[in-house]
Image (spheres, rainbow, N blue to C red):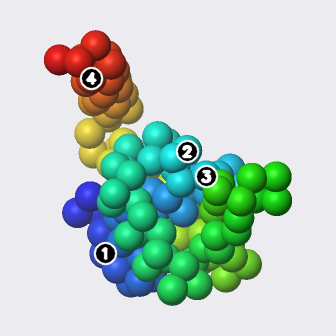
Amino acid sequence: MSRFRPVLNQHGVTEQQWRILRVLLDEDGLEPRQLCERCLISSPSIAGVLMRMEEAGLIKRERMAHDQRRVKVTVTAATKKLGKSIAPIIEREYLELEKKVGVKQLQQVYDTLDTLLQNLDSHEAIGD
């Protein structure tokens, strides 16, 4: 994260906020529980993060017409512009990281992390 944190700080976005924004920029209109799953952020944590993001004008939360208990989270027009500014910079940082570490080694790290997360999920599912 040390490569990405300065970019995010420069644009006034935290790491958790960027994870949420990145997902919403790809798949706008998700419920908070879906964001928890995709961003690996706990439900209690995401509630506060979404509140601060809404106050900052990064997202909008709307009750769903068919079920007022459910909420849909979407990005604002300003956030779409912000994403277009940040995404290329972040992408360049990933490319630099690939050059320094190597694509194969970086893929091994990603694969290991995916396996770790799957193992944690399976242990939590069976109550370990």
CB within 8 Å, label 1 to label 3: no
CB within 8 Å, label 2 to label 4: no
Give the image location of residue 66, x and y in percent.
82, 52
For label 3, the residue is: 31
Answer with left or right where residue 81 lies relative to residue 102: right
Q: Earlier in the sequence, mark 1 or mark 3?
A: 1
Quadrant housing the N terminus? bottom left
Q: Earlier in the sequence, mark 4 or mark 3?
A: 3
Amino acid carrying label 2: it is Gln
For label 4, the residue is: 124
For label 1, the residue is: 6
Give the image location of residue 38, x and y in percent.
49, 42
Q: Residue at x 51, y 86 (%)?
A: 56
Amino acid carrying label 4: it is Glu
Amino acid carrying label 1: it is Pro
Label 1 vs label 3, nearer the camera = 3
For label 2, the residue is: 34
Q: Residue at x 40, y 60 (%)?
A: 46
